[in-house]
Image: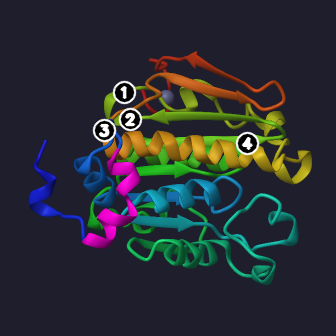
Amino acid sequence: MTNLAETVALSDDELMRYARQILLESWDIDAQLRLKSSRVVMIGAGGLGCPASETLVRAGLGQTHLIDDDEIEASNLQRQTLFLPEDIGRPKALTAAEMLEKINPLISARGTVARLNEDNAYDLLDMAAGKPSLLLDCTDNFATRDIINRISVRFQIPLLTASAIGTQGQLALFEPQLNTGCYYCVFGSVTHNAEIDERTCANSGVLASTTAIMGNLQANAALQYLGLTKNPLINKLLLWDGSRMQQRLMGYRQDKHCPVCAV
Ligand SMILES: [Zn+2]
């Protein structure tokens, strides 16, 4: 591993702000520098994107890019923690990015009002400037997850995907460059999931704590991956059931016939 201290350093303000984190035995200056050097693209600035980005930005993630084409509605305020009543009608991506930079002026956050697809992915992910360190899927439907998964495999960018509905959530971290398997290996095709896809937060509801927990579990996995270069969910799908206060880990393997990620 290259010596990060040679290329990037922490200012006095950063050392002060992140002091409690750097104190940790498991998290040192190098971890903090790796986090500072990371660029994360988050797709979805809603129920999951708000808590996930807030924790990552407070922790010191260097560059956050939020992509979302939605506007803030009154019914979002119950769980989308970066928004205030006066933000109703404003674009989520831009409002969230502004708030993140207010929360931590030592980092950079930007928002793009767009819907990511396979055609615009190269430009939206700024691939010309190099690969993002990690993609965070913070969306709420299978169709978009399928697209993000295909983009992750095509550009070989690790994908940390979270979902939340009702009192339940799921989390997985796929590393296409290591052939860990992908979202399709675990969940199958969009058509197969069409029925389940009918269940979105808009029509089935979600408890405020479910998105807060799943967004922060996602941030927790991202911090380990970016700061400590560890995937805490190698070939494991995390399942959270808030009504029973239960968390389970389920193993999975790459489907050698997966049409998306199998060579
Ligand atoms: Zn696959």
- The residue at which mark 1 appears reads as 179
Give the SS element for disc 1: loop
Earlier in the chain: of badge 3 and badge 4, it is 4
Q: Residues within 10 Å of mark 2 (few under 14, many from 20)?
A: many
Earlier in the chain: of badge 2 and badge 4, it is 4
Magenta: main secondary structure: helix
- The residue at which mark 4 appears reads as 164
Earlier in the chain: of badge 1 and badge 3, it is 1
State the scheme by which the image is colored.
rainbow
Q: Residues within 10 Å of mark 3 (few under 14, many from 20)?
A: few
Residue at 32 percent across and 67 percent down: it is: 14
Answer whether residue 167 is visible to the viewer in this image.
yes
Q: Would you place residue 178 above or below residue 41 in this image? A: above
Confirm whether the magenta stretch covers residue 240. no
Q: Residues within 10 Å of mark 1 (few under 14, many from 20)?
A: some
Q: Quadrant of the C terminus?
A: top left
Q: Quadrant of the N terminus?
A: top left
- The residue at which mark 3 appears reads as 229
Q: Is mark 3 within 8 Å of ligand 1?
A: no
- The residue at which mark 2 appears reads as 176
Q: Position of residue 257 (x, y in %)?
A: 48, 19
Q: CA distance from mark 3 to mark 4?
A: 26 Å
Residue at 11 percent across and 47 percent down: it is: 2
Q: Position of residue 37 (x, y in %)?
A: 28, 59
Report the span colored magenta. Answer: 12-23
Q: Residues within 10 Å of mark 4 (few under 14, many from 20)?
A: many
